[in-house]
Image: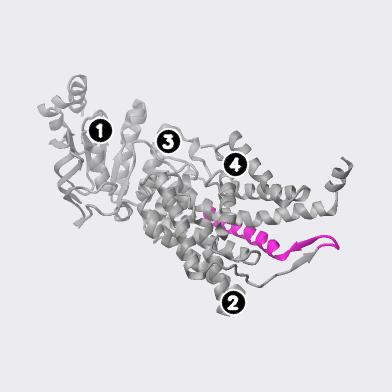
Amino acid sequence: MLRVEGLSKHFGGFTAVDNVDFSVEKGEILGLIGPNGSGKSTIFNMLSGTLKPNAGSIRLAGKEIAGAPPHRICVLGVGRTFQIPRPIRRLSILENAALAGYYGQAGAVTREDAWRSGSEALKLVGLPTNAGVSVNTLGAAGLKKLELAKALATKPSLLLADESLGGLDHAEMDQAAEMLKNIREELGVTIIWVEHIMGVLMRVVDRVMVLDHGEKIAEGRPQEVATDPKVIEVYLGTDAEEIAATASRT
Amino acid sequence: MAEFTEALFSVFFVETLINGLLLGGVLALLSLGLNLIFGVIDVVWICYAEIIMLGMYTIFYLHVDGGLPLIVAAAGGVGVTAVLGWLTHRLVIGYLLQAPPINQLLATGGLLFFFQGLAMVAFGIEFRNLGVSLGSLALSEDIYLSWTRLLSFAIAGVVVVVLYLFLARSYLGAAIRAISQDREIMVLMGVNTKKLYLLTSAIGGGLAGLAAALLVLQYDVHPFIGLSFGPITFMVCVMGGLGNMVGGFLAAFIFSELITIGGYFAELEWGYVLAFGFFIAAMFVRPEGLFARKS
């Protein structure tokens, strides 16, 4: 489904992502974790086209997309959410989603179809679908849901979820994790999920990839990764114990 | 005092108020395009009035030398200015989107002199008159209203409504509104921002052509004509809150009423002094514009 080879990105003399290879199978949920500044967001930005890689290839269903403009990558089926929600506040909730539905499908759908994509996406994440509800009525959790709905309305085959559940409480985190699982099951969407804390993520994903200083240091099933000494070294202290505890519970 | 009261209730004062309203229509039309471009692309086109000037020349030559009917010449003018708007973004602004705002201002300021010089070389410095007058409408024995201004007012009104419906109802319009808030996020929703910017620039240019069609009926064309309404247009936009189209529309009428009322009680020049004095005072009180949106 997605095959990434030799992906690198430098900012001046700083190497943000260094020769990273990975792949994602259709219908899989891949967790992408690592401490702050480890290159997760840079990888996301290259996958979605916001940044052009310095080297490497990104193949989506066999098609090379490395360096393509972001609007084209979106139309080809890559949806993305942001860690900090970025709704268009001048538009209503439904307009936000419908706009994504319209342009995410290259404007090749009718007005009504785009509306429908938008409201179906809203329903899936549990937001009101009636017209005219203002974005300003949403709280932190609601805005994250809207991010997800906007990405889903573009009808992606691959969803890049920059979830970073930091701002949410435990119940909301569980709910968000459930939602990603649901999306995979109901829509068959492949998901890459970025997080910097491991907790909930480890219970949901099929595989995890760990980044540190732009390099891939581990990859595998959650239990294996959580007990990997290199990973524990990166997540020193309480976090590592917590990871091991979470992983053994599942 | 009695003199003043008398002046206030005379029919001529009514005529003045109406004329101010009608002048406001032209100013509103002038500010619409500039505001649209600023609102979406976040760049002030200092050369906007010069694009209008080139539109006036286009209409003049198509009508007088080309012998085309005025309405066809006007359509030609709109077409030419739309292309000029498109080119301005394609060849200049497009490369400066990430540049500091001062560089963008300098570039469009340079375009101002480029267009002026070009017009001087190509058309000479003579004043050219279209030689068409639409005459005036006699409301009563004393009150005459210029048809040109009535037409400008009507067209400005229609354009505002059409533009509003376009921005409010169509996906393209919604995308334009959205992009003015967040440039980066829209591409991730599949929007080709480059295309949208070019389209906005072309619409803004076309609005300049429409304004040109109305101005060429009232004023002689010469290479420096842009300087006589460029600053006013800019100030109307700033007073309404740059990028706020409704605000600019209202500010146009405040400005035009001040000009005509000032001109009624003293000479016309005093009208401008009053209007610009009000502008300076307004900038002290509300530097973000009288109708700036709270963000």
Q: Which residue is mark 1?
A: A201
Contact flag, marks 2 and 3 (Cβ < 8 Å): no
Packing grade of label 2 (10 A; few <14, some 14-19, many >=20) is some
Q: Is residue A17 visible?
A: yes
Q: Secondary structure at mark 4?
A: loop
Q: Nearer the viewer, mark 1 or mark 4?
A: 4
Q: Which residue is mark 3?
A: A142
Q: Which residue is mark 4?
A: B291
Do tags 1 and 2 sit on the same chain? no
Identify the residue at horizontal 64%, vertical 67% (top origin): B217
Q: Which residue is mark 2?
A: B64
Badge 2 sits on which subunit? Answer: B
**Residue A8 horizontal/vertical position (percent):** 17, 44
Q: Nearer the viewer, mark 2 or mark 3?
A: 2
In this picture, residue B106 sits left or right of residue B159: left
Do tags 2 and 4 sit on the same chain? yes
Magenta highlight range = B139-168
Give the alpha-carbon distance from disc 1 to disc 4, as whole Å. Answer: 47 Å
Identify the residue at horizontal 41%, vertical 32% (top origin): A140
In the image, what residue type sits under mark 1?
A: Leu
Badge 4 sits on which subunit? Answer: B
Contact flag, marks 2 and 4 (Cβ < 8 Å): no
**Residue A162 horizontal/vertical position (percent):** 30, 38
Give the alpha-carbon distance from disc 2 to disc 4, as whole Å. Answer: 42 Å
